[in-house]
C-alpha cells in the first residue's frame, strides 16, 4: 500500500509539472483573450441598485468605467513594489494604489 501511495504522489507531481509548463507556453494566448474576459466581467457587474441588469447608455457607461478602472488597477498593481523589488502589502499597498489611481485619472 505505501508503494502505491508513493507512485500516485509521484505521478501527480509529474503531471503538475507538465501542466505548469503547458500553461506557461499558453500565456500569450491567454493574454490576448484577457480584454474579452474583463469585458464579460464588467458586463456582469453592470446591474442597478435593485439588482436588475442595466440597459442602453447606463450599461455602456458602466462597462466603460469598469474597463478603465481595471486597466488602471492592473497597471498600478504591477508598479506596487518597494525599493527591494518585493510586492507591497497591507496599508502601504492600499495607499500606493489610491495615489496611483488618482494620478492616472488626473493625467486623463
Image (spheres, rainbow, N blue to C red):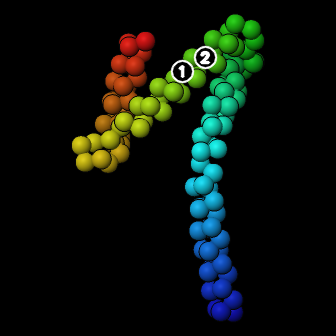
Q: Is residue 68 visible?
A: yes
In this picture, residue 67 sits left or right of residue 90: right
Closer to the camera, 19 or 66? 19
> How many numbered marks does the figure carry?
2
In the rendered image, the vertical position of residue 57 relative to residue 28, given as above or below = above
Quadrant containing the N terminus in the rendered view: bottom right
In this picture, residue 61 sits left or right of residue 93: right
Quote the CA–CA distance across marks 1 and 2.
6 Å
Residue under the image location 66 percent in, 85 percent down: 7
Q: Position of residue 34 (x, y in %)?
A: 62, 36
Residue carrying label 2: 64
Residue under the image location 59 percent in, 45 percent down: 28
Residue under the image location 63 percent in, 51 percent down: 26
Q: In which quarter of the image is residue 21?
A: bottom right
In the rendered image, the vertical position of residue 38 relative to residue 53, given as above or below = below
Which residue of the protein is positioned furthest toward the top in this rendering? Answer: 57
Quadrant containing the C terminus in the rendered view: top left
Q: Position of residue 78 (x, y in %)?
A: 41, 38
Q: In which quarter of the image is residue 38?
A: top right
Q: Is mark 2 on a helix, strand or loop?
A: helix
Residue carrying label 1: 68
Residue under the image location 48 percent in, 33 percent down: 74
- Check disc 1: other Cα within 10 Å, few if <14, some if 14-19, many if 20+: few
Closer to the camera, 83 or 29? 29
| Marks 1 & 2, CB-CB < 8 Å contact | yes
In the rendered image, the vertical position of residue 65 relative to residue 20, given as above or below = above
Amino acid at each position: 500500500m505505501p508503494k502505491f501511495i508513493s507512485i500516485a504522489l509521484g505521478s501527480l507531481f509529474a503531471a503538475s509539472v507538465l501542466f505548469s509548463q503547458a500553461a506557461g507556453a499558453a500565456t500569450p494566448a491567454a493574454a490576448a483573450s484577457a480584454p474579452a474576459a474583463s469585458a464579460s466581467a464588467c458586463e456582469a457587474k453592470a446591474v442597478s441598485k435593485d439588482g436588475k441588469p442595466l440597459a442602453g447608455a447606463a450599461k455602456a457607461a458602466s462597462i466603460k468605467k469598469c474597463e478603465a478602472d481595471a486597466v488602471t488597477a492592473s497597471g498600478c498593481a504591477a508598479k506596487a513594489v518597494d525599493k527591494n523589488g518585493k510586492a507591497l502589502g497591507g496599508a502601504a499597498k492600499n495607499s500606493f494604489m489610491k495615489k496611483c489611481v488618482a494620478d492616472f485619472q488626473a493625467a486623463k
